[in-house]
Image (cartoon, coloured by chain):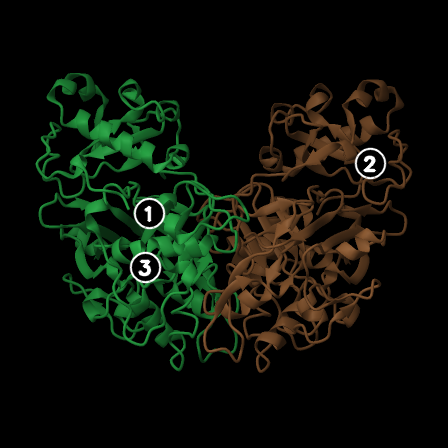
Chain colours: A green, B brown
Amino acid sequence: MTPIDETHAIDLPCWVDGAIGHPDFPVQNLPFGIFSPGDGAARPGVAIGDHILDLSAIGDRLPDAVQPLLGDDSLNRIMALPAADRVALRRALSRLLCDRDAQPALAPALHAQADCSLHLPARIGDYTDFYVGIHHATNVGTLFRPDNPLLPNYKYVPIGYHGRASSVRPSGVPVVRPKGQSKAPDAAEPRFGPSARLDYELELGIWIGQGNELGDPIPVQNAADHIAGFCLLNDWSARDFQAWEYVPLGPFLAKNFHSTISPWVITPEALAPFRQAQPARPQGDPAPLPYLLDAQDQRHGGLALDLAVSVRTAKMRDAGMPPFRLSQSRAEAMYWTAAQIVTHHASNGCNLTPGDLLGTGTISGPDQGSLGSLLEMTQGGKTPVILPSGERRSFLEDGDEVLLEARAHREGFASIGFGECRATILPVRA
Amino acid sequence: MTPIDETHAIDLPCWVDGAIGHPDFPVQNLPFGIFSPGDGAARPGVAIGDHILDLSAIGDRLPDAVQPLLGDDSLNRIMALPAADRVALRRALSRLLCDRDAQPALAPALHAQADCSLHLPARIGDYTDFYVGIHHATNVGTLFRPDNPLLPNYKYVPIGYHGRASSVRPSGVPVVRPKGQSKAPDAAEPRFGPSARLDYELELGIWIGQGNELGDPIPVQNAADHIAGFCLLNDWSARDFQAWEYVPLGPFLAKNFHSTISPWVITPEALAPFRQAQPARPQGDPAPLPYLLDAQDQRHGGLALDLAVSVRTAKMRDAGMPPFRLSQSRAEAMYWTAAQIVTHHASNGCNLTPGDLLGTGTISGPDQGSLGSLLEMTQGGKTPVILPSGERRSFLEDGDEVLLEARAHREGFASIGFGECRATILPVRA
């Protein structure tokens, strides 16, 4: 596991205005992304406070291994570096951003985030979504299959399915309400039209770093070495389409019209202080099969992350009201670790490639205030949520904006955050 | 629909040795691919008889629109061209290959296929597999869900799911037997190990040409314009893994360890003479919903293609025996047309991109000699196939080679073929 080192010290004297104590991006975080300053070309950068440090402008101060990659417009090749190179880059950046003598040279490479656009951090080769939030799986299973909520394979198999890579977009890109087929329980035939049950899903994303060759599995002991970072992921879902189309081959058009991610890649190094034991399985649950079981991963493979979903309707926005917090949950609701997810995915020899994105699936907690989707919060639409504006929501309406957040806290360490994962629903296109 | 023109004339005087009457690649076919001559760089080419014409070597004789794309090592940008540009390229190639005066200049650009390697024709952004073979869906449904073989959505929804793009390989690349979880019906717990029920699936692949923007559906009337060509696809399947993992989110590790495609892109132009009416739906079946219904597509959107699967075991190979034909079927067993597949995929605004690959799903015919998988032929492994070598096969064994073929015939036209889609099973890796 990634060690805690001097880059995690709580008292680092970062010279960037506002970076010390920044809720998301203090110098202890240093997430990577792809940004454009103004109308400039897309390039690699690092978030620091409310700024972005343009790595392409300071290449000569960075380790040799990354210098040839700083002209790229995606992080794929940087993600593919061995962890040791990523650690060296982090250390160099931490030193530079805490060294007053470096400030004059570096200051011109700092851009206000507000003046930049953020892109997808990588060209996503394949996107896979998992289903490791056990409370979510139980809740949704109860709605779709009341007699049979949690299927017999769930506690053995990190259930996943392939999603659509082409429709993943960074935070801020609006979501067009999809059309599709749905069938009311009492209707003789399905209809085709705009989704009436549009929902969000609160997920984490896992960025694959080094890949594996086709045919070569990734042992669970090595799986962490294949993870380049983490993000937030909103797996927008049209529940009416999903209920009609999902048998027997799984969700398809109900999910693939758009997925939103937070654009900053939060590295395993940044998360090192926030590792924890994977929660013990409840008494009576089977042990993971040996290929998924590693003592080190069980001790340190869990993530201590606070997650939250907020919504702001058009009416709330017009009235100047802030987003309303719908729920809060924690990553420890994951039944499988990130390492187990990676190992399972490659266990049949499936080749993962740098820049692949894996979603965890919706991370709901065990109680009403911790549910990661409206489907769960409203019990399939039956009990609408009441918002501070007086509006009611069974599912999302046009103009609604959904915001996902993740933050990590630990006594004695600087808190870090993932940055925003937000998007607004646009009306269906004619 | 693509018109029949002078490039389809049966008596074209092609000067390439052996091209006239070639079972796959007469001058009426002209499929595109990416090849390397010897150990040369990958480049675009066209199959003609037993040869490949190196397009990068004759750019100055080809239409302006394609000239800048001939240095590419994938066909993605050529696939993205409007159909009119592809037609112009086809016409230019047809004329050159039938013009004796052009022979001296072109001959140096011809390479024997036997001396070349063939690559994936495109960087596949996303790979989606459908399930439009209605006999296959019924047969498999009967095995997995005896009480409920064809689900209520089947005749309304072109059922599909996302597959794995990274593990698609061209014909000839061996398939490593995958490991995975399976659970015997009488076992208390699943086990992890090599698949004991490895199978092939006979499918067609559809190459996406021009894409659509996220949020903008593709009307069925325009869908044919978004198809750059067709190929064969073997969707290798581990039936033991599939049965255990597929609920509720569909097949995943049972399928994503490898998919084999034929490397030549058979264009819509080449297939123009082999279009036919989509078979009438049986009495009592619902009409397609309006967004999937186009009179022109119903009249011409079907494909008159003969499909076949053969197998050759290591023992047969050692004895010099040819591959044994296991089954033959026809593309008219597709319940939905290629245009309906494309339109449905984009109906929610999902963006398709040039070089995306869509599989049809297994194309089985209605009777025993026309089944596109061993699962169906052996009734789930219960009635093994007897091979000419005396060997029995319930599922594939190490050393078995599977060959898929597709050919189109029509009185008054030159027959064309898709070329080979073959691969051999290697033992599981330690």
Of labels 1 and 3, earlier in sequence is: 3
Judging by the rendered image, the residue that carries numbered circle 1 is A261
Any mark on residue B216, and which? none
Residue A282 placed where, x, y %?
27, 72
Chain under disc 1 = A
Judging by the rendered image, the residue that carries numbered circle 3 is A201
Task: In the rendered view, tell whether residue B222 sits above or below residue A52.
Answer: below
Residue B287 placed where, x, y %?
62, 69
Q: Amino acid at mark 2?
A: Asp
Q: Residue at x 73, y 65 (%)?
A: B279
Q: Is B142 left or right of A338, judged from the image as shown?
A: right
CA distance for labels 1 and 2: 48 Å
Residue B115 placed where, x, y %?
76, 31
Q: Amino acid at mark 3?
A: Glu
Q: Amino acid at mark 1?
A: Ile
Q: Residues within 10 Å of mark 1 (few under 14, many from 20)?
A: many
**Front residue of this view, candidates B61 and B126:** B126
Judging by the rendered image, the residue that carries numbered circle 2 is B50
